[in-house]
Image (cartoon, coloured by chain):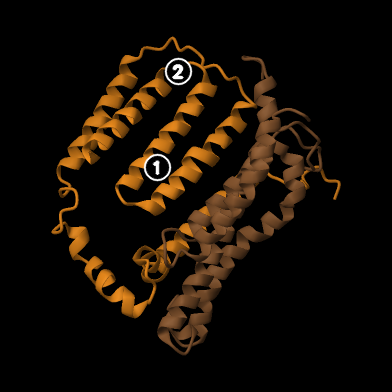
Amino acid sequence: MSTLIDILLLSLMGITALAAVRMKSLFGAVMLTGIFSLLSALWFLILDAVDVSFTEAAVGAGISTVLMLGTLSLTKSEEKTSNHSQIIPLFVVFVTGGVLIYGTLDMPDFADPLAPIHTHVAPHYIEKSGAEIGVPNIVTSVLASYRGFDTLGEVTVIFTAGVGVLLLLGIGRRREDGDE
Amino acid sequence: MTHHFILRVITKLLIPLILLFALYVQFHGDFGPGGGFQAGVIIAAALVLYALVFGLNTASAVIKEWVLLVLIPLGVLIYAGVGVASLLLGGNYLDYNVLAHDPVHGQHLGILLVELGVGMTVAAVLTTIFFAFAGRGHRDANGNLLPHSALSDEIRNRKDGQP
């Protein structure tokens, strides 16, 4: 049963991705990327990564879709037909895809208990989190406490992204007109 | 402004639930799935939904832009401040054990504050990015929002190929 759901979800994701690539109407393409994000949120849910699934559903399917719609309201919503040769892009895509697949060959099997990631610090987190942190959710104790520096870095990245957008687009008062 | 009657009613019903869920994810993150980042994006999603249906002007009356601009650094400062506090109390940076008499209580307090900081910054940044994008071309020289229709109307009313 679960294999069936896996196959169904992954093939739906494939179909959505192909449809988004072939779609000429950018509005439709944006909607399809939203659907793709929703499907990958489901996929994360099946992989037991509920936190990632939440985030993907809210950011990928929700906010980034809306941001792209906001961009569409400023530009044309029909894709320009290109006269360039499509052989070089196709070549780049196939080479990149091939390299990515080649990279996965070295990865440990899915849920392999002997994989390096499960033998380094993870056993300590799983065994000691209850006594040291006292928080039932180990994901939270790893993110906020054991790996607090990393999360601080992530928040700083988000902060920087916000500042960057504000500097480029800006909200609130602008002072460049010299009327201040 | 009588478009999307059903959307408006459903949105009004949904937004309190979305916000409540965000608060649950924020403060129950120690026990269930979720945490500051997830709660932040859910809050931002609720605000973006509100702005989509009721227009940017109404949304910026609900949450003022300067509030967002204060919340963005405040979240980072809370996070980094917890680290400084644990330094001052004699521990390492971001070592929550020293925040309370009992190390486990200290961890609880530290995680709660840190997640709060994360939630604030994430929610404010995502909402600000949306406001900045959606407000393009709808501001006067001083950067104040001009009255305009909701983004949903704008996309719907536009003819293809005409920017």
- Reply above or below: B144 against A26: below
Give the labeled residue for mark 1.
Answer: A41
Q: Is residue B24 visible to the viewer in this orientation of the structure? A: yes
Label 1 and label 2: CA atoms lie apart by 22 Å
Image position, residue A167 (x, y; %): 64, 46
Residue B30, quarter of picture = bottom left
At numbered mark 2, what does the secondary structure look like: helix, strand or loop? loop
- Reply above or below: B146 against A180: above
Q: Residue furthest left?
A: A114
Indicate which label's residue lies in the foreground, 1 or 2.
1
Q: Residue furthest top?
A: A83
At numbered mark 1, what does the secondary structure look like: helix, strand or loop? helix
Chain B colour is brown
Image position, residue A39 (x, y; %): 39, 36
Viewer-side residue, B161 vs B32 = B32
Residue at (46% x, 43% y) in the render: A57
Residue A42, quarter of picture = top left
Viewer-side residue, A50 vs A178 = A50
For badge 1, the amino acid type reads Ala
Callout 1: few (<14), some (14-19), or many (20+) C-alpha neighbours within 10 Å? many
Q: Earlier in the sequence, mark 1 or mark 2?
A: 2
Q: Residue furthest right?
A: A179
For badge 2, the amino acid type reads Met
Total marks shown come to: 2
Q: Chain of mark 1?
A: A
Q: Is residue A168 visible to the viewer in this orientation of the structure? A: no
Image position, residue A19 (x, y; %): 40, 21
Residue at (24% x, 28% y) in the render: A95
Chain A colour is orange
Give the labeled residue for mark 2.
Answer: A23
